[in-house]
Amino acid sequence: MPKISIILAVYNVEPYLKRSLDSLMNQTMKDLEFICIDDCSTDNSLAVLKEYEAKDSRFKIIASDKNYGAAIARNKGLEVACGEYLGFIDPDDDIDLNYYEELYKRAKEADYDIVKCSIKTIKQDGTITKSNLNNIIRKNGIYFFFQEWTTAIYKSSIIFENNIKFPSKIRKSQDTAFLSRIVLKSKTISLIDDIFYYYYKREGSLDASKLPINSLYSALQSKELVCDEINKSDLYESDKNSYILLYKIWLKSILNSYLFRNKSFKARLLCADSVINSYNKCKDIKALNEIFEYKWMLKYIHNKNKIILALLLILYRNKKQLLHFTPLEQIFSVKNLKMNNKKFKTITLFCVKISFRIKEKKSG
């Protein structure tokens, strides 16, 4: 039995694939297996995978007969994985060559359920940024829900014994729901700061600044599914404060992660519906009301008035506005301004601002 099984879902990533596979093949830890599922790529990705399979017997290739999506592809990998721990890597990313050796060594020190490293993001212009999420997780373990899920290894017994799989009906962002199920079943997590997963941020990825409506819908489905998983767990009974805090942060992430990345009314409506659905499933709505930042939303959330909430969300252009302004100020307001010793009156009506100069009365 290999110490770690690593699963890759591959689809049309030929230009980046060899970089990723090289980082796996050259790992300092040798007792690994690499399960690569080609999801019916239309480029030469499958040919590249077979090339590596011929060079290294640790590569196991599964070729799908049609494009099922990443969730089903990864589930196929789970069906054949037999490692003590499971790891995942996106086929356009790569890792330090001692990545799995160091994570496994830490896992065995105290039989940890999860061991997570750090991540560096490489943008298209070559800019590299390092995440500080490990430090945030140390302050409160609930922030592990927001980690980059590929930056960890997971004890396979937790996944298999609890029948944890990727939700196949969600085409994108299924990893969020998958991770939440593992975290809620895990007891121990260890963090390593100086081992890195290298994430290459490409145009068109789910976290891009502009999000297509179908990707937004899928992401929101996943967010709601996580709320369901939180409610099905014993977190509320075991740690009510963490439950409420996690719930609040998760709802905030629905708005801040997606609301400003597609500015159509349909996107606003989807976000409003998702927040309303998830909020009203909370086991202690009164406690959630007390710490939820966007107080002005509560009336519409509790009344389940998604159309009005969506219309109001159109008024907000950025996250700061969402928190600090009220809808009334954006719908109608009258303000007096003074510029260059001249007085102006500004009227705002449904986000349209009209300014006109105020003539001063002549004395005498």
Image (cartoon, rainbow, N blue to C red):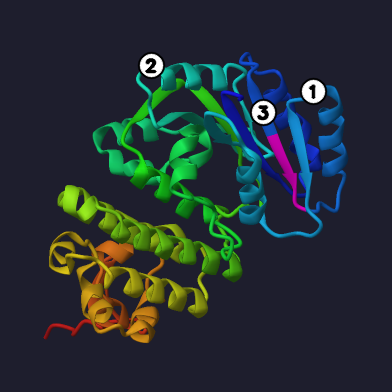
| Dot 3 alpha-carbon crowd within 10 angstroms: few under 14, some 14 to 19, many 20 or more | many
Does residue 244 appear left or right of residue 84 in this picture?
left
Task: Identify the residue at image location x=60%, y=44%.
Answer: 78
| Residue under numbered circle 1 | 56
Q: Is residue 53 above or below residue 330?
A: above
**Sequence order check: which comes first, mark 3 or mark 1?**
3
Magenta region: which residues? 35-39
332 or 156, which lies in front? 156
Quadrant of the drawing holding the C terminus: bottom left
Label 1, secondary structure: give it. loop
Amino acid type, residue under disc 2 in the picture: Glu
Marks 3 and 1 sit apart, C-alpha to C-alpha, by 10 Å
Q: Is residue 75 above or below residue 217?
A: above
Task: Identify the residue at image location x=60%, y=33%.
Answer: 82
State the predominant SS element of the stretch in magenta: strand
| Residue under numbered circle 3 | 33
206 or 154, which lies in front? 154
Picture coordinates of residue 289, whole percent (x, y): 16, 66
Q: Is residue 36 magenta?
A: yes
**Sequence order check: which comes first, mark 2 or mark 3?**
3
| Residue under numbered circle 2 | 109
| Dot 2 alpha-carbon crowd within 10 angstroms: few under 14, some 14 to 19, many 20 or more | few
Cβ–Cβ under 8 Å for marks 1 and 2:
no
Amino acid type, residue under disc 3 in the picture: Glu
| Dot 1 alpha-carbon crowd within 10 angstroms: few under 14, some 14 to 19, many 20 or more | few
